[in-house]
Image (cartoon, rainbow, N blue to C red):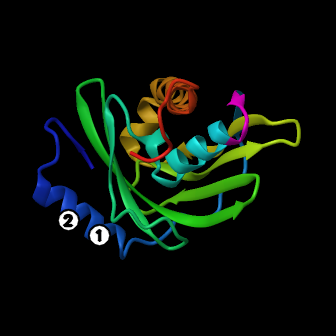
Amino acid sequence: MLQLRRPSEASRSAALQAAGTAAPHPALTGRSAVHEETIGWGLKRFERARLALRRLEPFQGPGTELVWDRSLEPGSRLVVLGRRMGLWTAGPVEITKVDEGERHLLVELRTLEGHPLRGEERFIVERHLNGIVRFRIEAVSKPHAWWAVLVTPALRFFQRRFRQRAVAHLRNVTSANRASVAR
């Protein structure tokens, strides 16, 4: 979906309902992007980063919001609303894997039919034995909608910017001057 105005509450609900029946895109191989950075050190920072990823906070920021039922489990579907270059898009995605251990949280998503891109993303927060907390994004995608093919260079730019903002957000929520883990 591509439109000039922000999707109404009714159209966001309809998009989420449609995501519930949308077919997943076929598995994709090829171009892959990996972005990994240190976001802090220690158990408290790790716990804060893990909580933020559980809430899918790295997805939400300027020009991006989520429509979902807040269920972080495989099979859950959500719609990513984005505003870029004055246009709104709504892309349905599905959570395909959630793996949580003592030192990590992995959330894996794939696009569904109706998303302007075809691909998969993994988001991983990990605390290493030395206490370092790292955040990694692994993605493979390619344009799917006709208009996405036309603006591929701009899409790649926005994807890089998204990765930078996601890291910056986790650094912010894990900073030492945050009072508590819970909001």
**How far is mark 2 from mark 1, CA to CA?**
6 Å
Circle number at residue 67: none
Instruction: Specify the amino acid type for callout 2.
Output: Ala
- The residue range painted magenta reads 39-43
The residue depicted at 60 percent of the width and 48 percent of the height is 50
> Residue placed farthest to the front in the image?
179
Instruction: Indicate whether 77 appears above or below 21.
Output: above
Which residue is at 27% across, 71% downward?
Answer: 17
**SS assignment at label 1:** helix
Location of the C terminus by quadrant is top left
Query: Residue beneath label 1, please?
Result: 18
Q: Is residue 93 left or right of residue 65?
A: right
In this rendered view, identify the residue nearer to me: 23 or 7: 7
Amino acid type indicated by mark 1? Ala
- Report the predominant secondary structure element of the magenta stretch: strand
| Residue 90, visible in the rendered structure | yes
Do the residues bearing badges 2 and 1 touch, measured as CB atoms within 8 Å?
A: yes
Q: Position of residue 61 (x, y in %)?
A: 37, 33
Out of 104 and 63, give the one closest to the viewer. 104
The numbered dot on residue 14 is 2
Q: Quadrant of residue 151?
A: top left
- Number of other residues with Cα within 10 Å of mark 1, as a class: few under 14, some 14 to 19, many 20 or more: some
Q: Residue at x 47, y 27 (%)?
A: 158
> In the image, is residue 183 part of the stretch drawn in magenta?
no
The residue lying toward the viewer, choosing from 144 and 8, is 8
Q: Residues within 10 Å of mark 2 (few under 14, many from 20)?
A: few
- In the displayed structure image, the side of residue 101 where residue 20 appears, left or right: left
